[in-house]
Each structure stands twice: as C-alpha cells, then as structure tokens.
Amino acid sequence: MAAKRFFPGVHYVVFVGKVPGIYESWIDCSEQVTRFPGAAFKKYPSLEEANNAWTAYVEAHSHVQLLSPQVPELPTDYPPLLVPVQANMDDQTPSKLPKYCMYIAMLLVGVVIGILLLLVIMYIFF
C-alpha cells in the first residue's frame, strides 16, 4: 500500500535499509530506514534519476542482489549422503513443542506452589 505523496514526482532511493529499493513517498522510505543502523537513502526529483542512481549503486556493489522470484538450481553432482535439503516455505507448519513445554512448566510451577502451601499449613497447625 503506497502512502500519500507529499511532493509529486519526488522519489527516494533506499541504498541500505530494511528493504532497499525505490520509494515514491517519504513515509514509505522512512519505514525502511528508521531504526536501521547504517541506513543510506537519498531523494531524487524524478523517477528516471532515482532509477539511474539505484542501477549505478547495484552495479557498483556486486554483493547487492535484486530480489527474484526464481529459485536457483542446485548442483546435482553431490555424493548421495551430502544432498542439500531445500525447505519449502509454503509447507512449513509451526511446531507444537513450545505449547506443550509451556503446559509442563505451568504444571510444575503449580505443583511447587501446592507443596509450599502444604508445608506452610503443616508448620502453622502442627
């Protein structure tokens, strides 16, 4: 969802931030650079200038990669026991272990409190 533009035609390039790229409003740009250590961004008067600056930055910094929907092919010449496992992000379900661990912890705390109360009652009345 794009935010309302305060200055028509102005574009912001986030070179280093949460999600680097070109943004049409300061609100969208500030979301990417606020509280991001070492954030780098700049305002440009036109989309063409912003695009040129972004392209030049990407070309100058070979470690910057543009996001692509394509998944790179894995090499197939691995030995049988060293085949890499590629996770399918659509098929992940949350583990139920933390839920059960929380119930067990709550049960143990209840048992400890019960024992302490029983000891206090025994001390007072006996």
Image: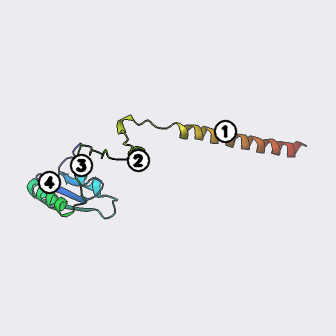
Q: CA distance from mark 1 to mark 2?
A: 43 Å
Number of labels in the image equals 4
Q: CA distance from mark 3 to mark 2?
A: 28 Å
Q: Along the polypeptide, which appears first: circle 3 or circle 1?
A: 3
Out of 121 and 20, give the one closest to the viewer: 20
Query: Considering the image in quadrants, where does the N terminus appear?
Result: top left
At horizontal 75% and vertical 40% (from top left) the residue drawn is 114
Q: Along the polypeptide, which appears first: circle 3 or circle 4?
A: 4
The secondary element bearing badge 1 is classed as helix
Q: Are circles 3 and 2 on residues that touch, CB within 8 Å?
A: no
> Which numbered disc covers residue 7?
4
Q: Along the polypeptide, which appears first: circle 3 or circle 2?
A: 3
> Which of the two discs, 1 and 4, sits closer to the camera?
1
Residue 124 visible somewhere in the drawing: yes
- In the picture, residue 15 is in which quadrant? bottom left
Q: Using residue 107 as the reference point, say whether residue 46 is left or right of it.
A: left
Residue 14 position in % (x across, y down): 22, 57
Categorize mark 4 by other alpha carbons within 10 Å: few (<14), some (14-19), many (20+).
Answer: few
Residue labelled with disc 3: 67
Q: CA distance from mark 1 to mark 4?
A: 59 Å
At horizontal 21% and vertical 45% (from top left) the residue drawn is 2
Residue labelled with disc 1: 107
Q: Along the polypeptide, which appears first: circle 4 or circle 2?
A: 4
Residue that lies at the very extreme toward the right in this rendered image: 126
Up-down relation of residue 12 to residue 102 (above or below): below
Residue 104 position in % (x across, y down): 63, 39
> Which numbered disc covers residue 82?
2
At horizontal 27% and vertical 43% (from top left) the residue drawn is 71
